[in-house]
Amino acid sequence: MKTCMKVLAMVALVLPLVAFGGPVNINTADAETISAELKGVGLSKAKAIVEYRRKHGAFRSADDLSLVKGIGERTVELNRSDIQVSVTKKK
């Protein structure tokens, strides 16, 4: 019983440290959302993503993120399954 309680206590302590990213549309999300959802992307890199999008238009693929200064291919690969690039049409 003590061992079970110790294991549960350890899990409870470690669980908040596990970061779960989620799908994020890099063509519509703000910098705060991008930095919260993508691994290895802090707020300054997320702001660079938003600024690049503003200047150059919508991203066509996840690979286009590597065009943003500070975002490398490794970061794209780490987040590929969470990157969405759909473009919403303006009315």
Image (spheres, grey):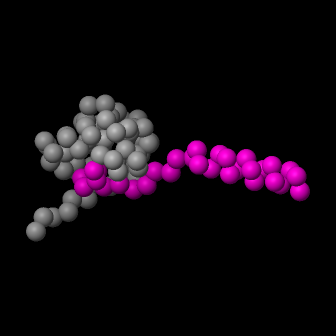
- Magenta segment: 1-30
Q: Quadrant of residue 44?
A: top left
Which residue is situated farthest in the bottom direction here? 91
Which residue is situated farthest in the left direction here? 91
Percent position (x, y) of residue 28?
Answer: 25, 55
| Viewer-proximal residue among 84 and 42 | 42
The residue located at (36%, 35%) in the rendering is: 73
Residue 4 on the magenta span: yes
Percent position (x, y) of residue 24?
Answer: 35, 54
Quadrant of the image containing the C terminus: bottom left
The answer to whether residue 81 is visible is no
Q: Is residue 4 above or below residue 88?
A: above
Which residue is situated farthest in the top direction here? 70
The answer to whether residue 86 is visible is yes
Percent position (x, y) of residue 17?
Answer: 58, 44
Percent position (x, y) of residue 61?
Answer: 27, 49
Answer with left or right where residue 65 lies relative to residue 42: left
